[in-house]
Image (tube, rainbow, N blue to C red):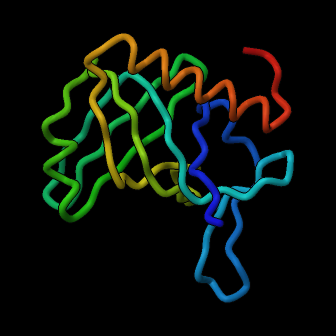
């Protein structure tokens, strides 16, 4: 059975970034030992940058910030986003020496309804409980 993609706060992305021996999978090993390659994260766009071959933004969920980058077909999706927009991002975790941990965009949803944000926050709480983080 395939594991569900975690919904996390940015502050929960603490741990070591690793690559499998066969170099087919990169993952973040969280402090509780869980390994994640993909995630959902919610936040407000606080910075944005568009280039010829990429688009990037910085997402702030009030616990931290993380850079989200898009390449290929996803570039145009990020270019439509503005500072101040609230988003749910689904992406693959990556890491490099210059930027640390960042997210490569797979999908995004712009939050239009307050209930969508509340639902996502309740999903985060369920994941935090699983990770052993009981503070709301």
| Residue plotted at (59% across, 21% down) | 122
Q: What is the quadrant of the N terminus in the image?
A: bottom right
Q: Position of residue 24 (x, y in %)?
A: 58, 82
Q: Is residue 24 left or right of residue 116?
A: right
Residue at the image point whose x is 55% and y is 60% from the top: 96
In the rendered structure, the answer to whether residue 69 lies left or right of residue 119 reads left
Query: Is 18 drawn above or below residue 129 in the view shown?
Result: below
Residue 21 vs 42, above or below: the answer is below
Q: How many marks?
A: 0
Instruction: Depth check: give the residue in front, 42 or 100.
Output: 42
Quadrant in the rendering for residue 22: bottom right
Judge whether 103 appears above or below 110 on screen: below
Q: Residue furthest front?
A: 1
Residue 53 at x, y = what percent?
18, 61
Residue at image point 18% right, 46% down: 77
Residue shown at the point (18%, 62%) measured from the top left:
73
Image coordinates for residue 108, horizontal then vertical, percent: 31, 41
Q: Residue furthest top?
A: 114
Q: Is residue 69 left or right of residue 101?
A: left
Q: Quadrant of the C terminus?
A: top right
Q: Quadrant location of residue 115? A: top left
């Amino acid at each position: 059975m395939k594991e569900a993609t975690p919904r996390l706060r940015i502050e929960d992305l603490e741990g070591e970034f690793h690559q499998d021996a066969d170099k087919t999978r990169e993952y973040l090993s969280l402090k509780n030992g869980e390994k994640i390659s993909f995630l959902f994260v919610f936040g407000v766009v606080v910075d944005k940058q568009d280039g010829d071959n990429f688009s990037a933004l910085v997402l702030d969920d009030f616990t931290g910030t993380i850079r989200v980058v898009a390449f290929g077909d996803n570039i145009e999706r990020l270019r439509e986003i503005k500072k101040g927009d609230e988003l749910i991002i689904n992406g693959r975790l990556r890491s490099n020496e210059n930027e640390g941990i960042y997210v490569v965009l797979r999908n995004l949803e712009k939050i239009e309804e307050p209930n969508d944000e509340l639902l996502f926050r309740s999903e985060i709480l369920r994941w935090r409980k699983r990770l052993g983080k009981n503070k709301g």
